Image: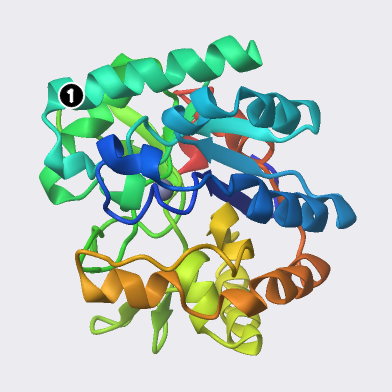
Amino acid sequence: MKQQPQNIFSVDLEDWYQGIEIDMQHWEQFAPRIREGLDRLLDLLAASNTKATFFVLGYQAEKTPDIIRQLKEQGHDIASHGYSHRFVYQQTPKEFQTELRKSKQILEDLCGVAIEGYRAPYFSITAQSRWALDILLDEGFLYDSSLFPINNYRYGMPGANRAPGWLRTDAGNHIYEIPLSTVQLPKPGLKWARNLPMSGGGYFRLYPYALSALLIKRLMSENQGLVFYMHPWEYDPAHPRVSFKRRLPKLTHYLHLRSTANKTRKLLADFEFTTIKDAYSECYQNSSARSCS
Ligand SMILES: [Zn+2]
């Protein structure tokens, strides 16, 4: 592993209607808009010469294979975001395995390289669905980036390690885990400290840019790199307003979309980012590299 921990720019690649708890069987009725936000995001990345890791939803890869080939040609890193965007803890292990295998095959056929990484829809590997980590290993994945060491109403594993490293699974295997970033407040190590999420998505849209920058510097002072994530639809403020099953996801989904692009431009000017493959492959490809923990 490189001396200085690097910041990761990751994108969960899905269209606007795929991550709002609507079952896949209803998706055909919604207008596809993935290009609207994605092109803006790709322009921002290109302008700062930044490569990102894209966790691609298998369903979307089937719909728009040209996008996945374009990302690969532009030098971005491709990983899996499953197939149907269902919560992992609402799937059986068998359903999860079937979807995972399908998504990996689609992406490998398109990209011609092994797909090494996975991020769960809604970060939904929790205490209830830790079994998924062993299935990831069984299916040939080398790392996971699903754990969020906070307590959110949809996800979270508050006691999980905050830094990337080897994680022992329920079956006693080891997988390299790259958790979403948090900072501990009021300061790290205090018994009553709490983890504050600050790693992207709705949190990045909610916080003023100056606060995000402050939290990133705080994280870096702990010798940790930021694991940042966004979605293409967060760069498409004009995407349709629809009714949600629940109120809170609707609030967070549409929050401050107009300022995402400008905030991201500042972020990319102020901090350097790279892909997970670039920053961590020496760790996750070498299971004896316990020094990477
Ligand atoms: Zn997603």
- Identity of the residue drawn at 65% across and 80% down: 213
Q: Amino acid at mark 1?
A: Glu
- Identity of the residue drawn at 39% across and 60% down: 162
Viewer-proximal residue among 262 and 155: 262
Mark 1, other Cα within 10 Å: few <14 / some 14–19 / many ≥20: few
Residue 94 image position (x, y, % from top left) = 15, 20
Q: Is 128 placed left or right of 132 in the picture? A: left
The residue beneath circle 1 is: 95
Q: Quadrant of residue 204?
A: bottom right
Residue 214 image position (x, y, % from top left) = 62, 84
Residue 27 image position (x, y, % from top left) = 36, 41
Q: Name the quarter where the C terminus is drawn.
A: top left
Q: Name the quarter where the N terminus is drawn.
A: top right
Q: Is 72 placed left or right of 129 in the picture? A: right
Viewer-proximal residue among 143 and 70: 70
| SS for callout 1 | helix
Q: Is residue 71 visible?
A: yes
Residue 174, above or below 189: above
Residue 250, above or below 35: below
- Identity of the residue drawn at 29% across and 67% down: 243
Residue 144 image position (x, y, % from top left) = 40, 37
Q: Is 270 placed left or right of 13 in the picture? A: right
Q: Is residue 120 visible?
A: no
Residue 138, above or below 293: above
Viewer-proximal residue among 85 and 94: 85
Color encoding of the figure:
rainbow
Q: Quadrant of residue 28?
A: top left
Q: Residue furthest front?
A: 29
